[in-house]
Amino acid sequence: MGVQVPLLAELNEGGPLKVKLAEPKPWLRSLEFEIPPEDINKKFDEKLNLYQRQIKISGFRPGKAPLHLIKNKFSDAIHLEVLEKVIEDAIQESCKTNNLIPINSPKVDIKEKAKDKPFVFTAEFEIHPPVDIQNYKKLGVNKEVKPITEHEVSHELKHLQEKLAKFKTHEGTSEEGNFVVIDYVKLEPDGKIIDKNRIKNFPVELGSGRVKEFDEALKGCRSGDEKKIRCSFPKEYHEKELAGQPVEFLVNVKEVKDRMLPPLDDAFAQSLGDFKSLDDLKKKIKSDLIEHEEKRAVQEAYAKVIDKIIEKNPFEIPPSLVENYIDKVIEDNQRRRGYKMSREEVKKNYEALAEKEIKRYLIVQNISQKEAIQVTQDEVNAMIKKYADAQGLVFEEAKRMMREKGRTLDLRNEIQEEKTLDFLLNN
């Protein structure tokens, strides 16, 4: 659909300026401009005179070179500058007039730029989609909190026991249950080694079953052994670049160790903190698991609420928002893990999540505005205090750190989202 929009006064000194606004998609706007040639010619002459005053030409004093010489030498460059400035001003003023806020750089397509004809071009850009969420109450979503079993408590206790284990050198060849400390490097398809990719002092628990071929190949080895191991990683492996791939490694065995687990008794509990007995430790573990399960159930319910709202209110989102999300995933991964994942790989794994997270944000913003859900300073301070207590900081110091890192607004957004989603769960 195309509509005529108000004219741009400062570009309209020589004749009528035509501007059409089209909305190909709810999140996409297209502006078509037609600017009279006399407007362009006037700006060309102004720029030409400016060039004459500023450009130094051999054989002439500054500002005294003939205009026709300047024109012959710089005509194309001046014309390009004029068009670029006209495009920039036209887009900016039209967006201001029509209350449009682009969220990406406009894609400009010049249709006609002959000097004796109207200058015609289009500018296409994305905006935040107009979101008006309806039917968001009485969604029938409830928290589903699972009871914590003794088996789960025992599992966590075993995990603590393993963390406090001591190790001694194993006599003889490695066997299931041993820890084998290795240096390894992935071999390239041509067999070459990239030394910077070498991983050192990596512990492998034999029998853990993460990668079976790797486990089996390391059984029966001794310190000082070197071997090539070829294995296929499971499709669900946490390192996406290895998941489902056949890979060959060159492995050097550094040590083989036995793990010595401490006995699970009162002394063990006392070594972990302010616990008088093993029963006290078990109660604390169960309390933590209950708290964790409550949080998990809430997040699961939030996700179901968003899914139901999206189902009742389907809407599209601009591709640029998804691309920005992908950019952040790539940057975060590089900062945390030290290497850059390919954009194709990240899009494949994160595109659906990106779309859902962006829709969640837009839904929460719209509903919180409709329901006048506000965040108070007391709520922000309570969140900062919780962070300060967890980090062992004084409240004012934590507050200053939050401000310096620009986290205060993030906290407000997090609190507003939580309050909005709680509202949706309870109404």
Image (tube, rainbow, N blue to C red):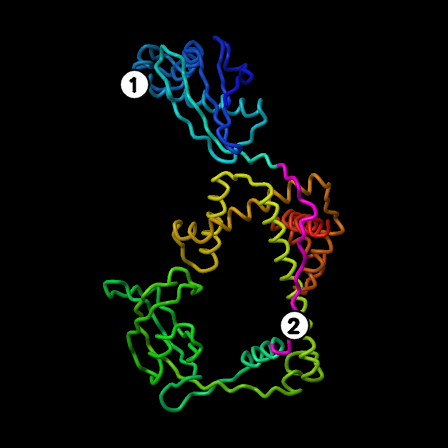
Q: Position of residue 34 (x, y in %)?
A: 44, 16
Badge 1 amino acid: Ser
Q: Nearer the viewer, residue 260 or 232?
A: 232
Report the magenta stretch's main SS.
loop
Q: Residue shown at 70%/56% (left/top)?
A: 383
Mark 2 neighbour density, 10 Å: few (under 14) some (14–19) many (20 or more): few
Distance from disc 2 to disc 1, alpha carbons, whole Å, reads 88 Å
Q: Secondary structure at mark 2?
A: loop
Q: Which mark is residue 220?
A: none
Number of labels in the image equals: 2
Q: Which mark is residue 148?
A: 2
Q: Residue furthest right?
A: 378
Amino acid type assigned to the residue bearing label 2 in the image: Ile
Say few, some or many: other residues with alpha carbon within 10 Å of mark 1 (under 14 / 14 to 19 / 20 or more): few
Q: Which residue is mark 1?
A: 58
Closer to the chain start, of discs 2 and 1, is 1
**Residue 255 is drawn in which quadrant?**
bottom left
Identify the residue shown where x is 42% and y is 23%: 84
What range of the chain is rendered magenta? 132-151
Question: Picture coordinates of residue 376 (x, y %)?
Answer: 75, 47
Foreground: 411 or 403? Answer: 411
Is residue 97 positioned above or below 116 on the image? below
